Amino acid sequence: MGSDGDRPRVSVVIPTYNRCEMLRTSLEHLTRQRLPAGDFEVIVADDGSSDATREVVESFADRLRVKYHFQEDLGFRAGTARNAGARLADAPILVFLDTGPLFGPDLLLRHLEAHGDDDVRRAVIGYAYGYRPEKDMSWITDAVQRLGPEATVARYADDPEFQDVRHPQLQNVVSGADLLPWRLFFTINCSVRTEDFRAVGGFDEEFHGWGGEDTELAFRLSRHGVRFHVAEDAWVVDLPHEREQFDLWEQLARNMLHFLAQHREPVVEIGLALAIKHLFWSYEEDYRGLVTWQERVRDRDVAAELAEAVRHVPPGAKIAILGAGADIPPSMPPAIVLDFDASLVARATASGRHVGHHTMGLRTPLAEQSVDTVIITSRMAGLWDRWQDELLAEARRIGREVVVPAGFGGVHD
């Protein structure tokens, strides 16, 4: 269907790679949208397919406003493909979807409505029924074939086994109780104003492989002042397909390393640590634990502790202090001060005598074996039970000796 010259209200961007029949199903469902076909455009961003993807897209030209972009196959580059699709977009709202899910007939209308208040800049998290990538969800295919997607949703919407794996966290976003709503912004089904997407630079194209690029984009949108909104009525049904979930977790962990390299903050360190452990759903809880502990020890002075520890460090040794706080004793030689409280790091380094990094210590920016001694202070006590293994591993990675005050951990390498 050719454009009638009017600007579309919504641009749908779908990246794809060698899934032409799944793409055909997705495009068929877009022809069923209650939003008039002239009000939206569909941009298929092909990540180097060698199958009939182009032909499938072209076959919908009489039913949808379609555009097609092809990029060379240089590996999994979904973020790059999405950016290319977004550059072709003419609408003020970008909706990002995946190849494969079935789309509810009101999907685009609901996304459009969620952006209806021009005074509120929103990123919209759509719902994904059946999205449980680590479980066998093959029964959904049978249900959809028997009932169709709308009837399947009507029948199973309250079944925890059919609900979006993010369901409990999404409810917390709705209630305003979630500290990190951006971590739930998945490109299986989401939308954002085009001007906000472009203002933050779109997806980071250094992400290769699966996972993390949507989370990192949402992190930047959050810092840009965009609020996150859940639109449960803007739904898709994720049909099960083959996934090598262990390999995907490994790809995510590599991408989270890049995420942290771009945003050196404790909240991203936690995300990396959880990805390495093949975990994700405790992200909010773990970050809340850090925030609570930070408030509790904001005024904890460990200067005396450090003065005692440095007495046992050989002269001339290069020192890093994890949990340094703001008050470094005069007896401390120039050191690298590390703390989860950015304001205290700023105070500790204000004189120029010490250098500092805002870090929780799960993954610091320091190179391997770059210091002689790492001193861990009692400011880390409230994080120790949860993160002891990771904190010690990182301290041993960057330092040849690790000192923990007596009575705290009893560790002295």
Image (spheres, rainbow, N blue to C red):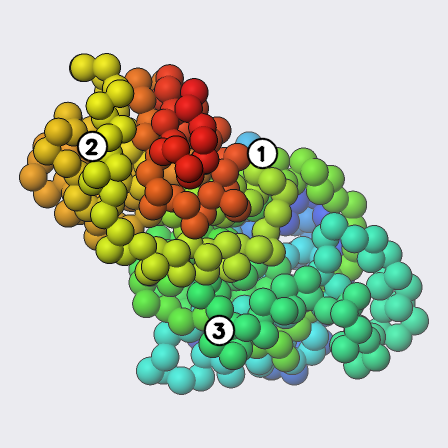
The quadrant of the picture occupied by the N terminus is: bottom right
Measured in 3D between alpha carbons, the distance from the residue under mark 1 to the one under mark 2, in whole angstroms, is: 52 Å
Give the class, few, some or many, for how many residues have Cα within 10 Å of label 2's Cα (few <14, many ≥20). some
Q: Are marks 1 and 2 in contact (CB under 8 Å)?
A: no
Measured in 3D between alpha carbons, the distance from the residue under mark 3 to the one under mark 2, in whole angstroms, is: 41 Å
Q: What type is the residue that disc 1 sits on?
A: Gly
Q: Secondary structure at mark 1?
A: loop
Q: Looking at the image, which residue sits at the far left?
A: 351
Q: Secondary structure at mark 2?
A: helix
Q: Which quadrant of the view contains residue 125?
A: bottom right
Which circle's residue, 3 or 1, is located before the other in the chain?
A: 1
Task: Point out residue 73 in the picture as x, y percentages from the top left corner.
Answer: 58, 34
Q: Looking at the image, which residue sits at the far front?
A: 407
Task: Point out residue 186 in the picture as x, y percentages from the top left corner.
Answer: 56, 59
Is 32 situated above or below 289? below
Q: Which of the two discs, 3 and 1, sits closer to the camera?
A: 3
Which residue: 27% across, 28% down? 309
Q: Which quadrant of the view contains residue 190?
A: bottom right
Q: Are marks 3 and 1 in contact (CB under 8 Å)?
A: no
Which label number is shown at residue 177? 3
Is 6 situated above or below 169? below
Q: Judge by depth and name the residue closer to the eye, 329 or 119.
A: 329
Measured in 3D between alpha carbons, the distance from the residue under mark 3 to the one under mark 1, in whole angstroms, is: 38 Å
Q: Is residue 181 visible?
A: yes
What residue did someone put label 2 on? Answer: 307
Q: Which of the two discs, 3 and 2, sits closer to the camera?
A: 2
Q: Judge by depth and name the residue closer to the eye, 89 or 340.
A: 340
Q: Which quadrant of the view contains residue 320?
A: top left
Q: What type is the residue that disc 3 sits on?
A: Ala
Q: Is residue 357 visible?
A: no
What residue did someone put label 1 on? Answer: 75
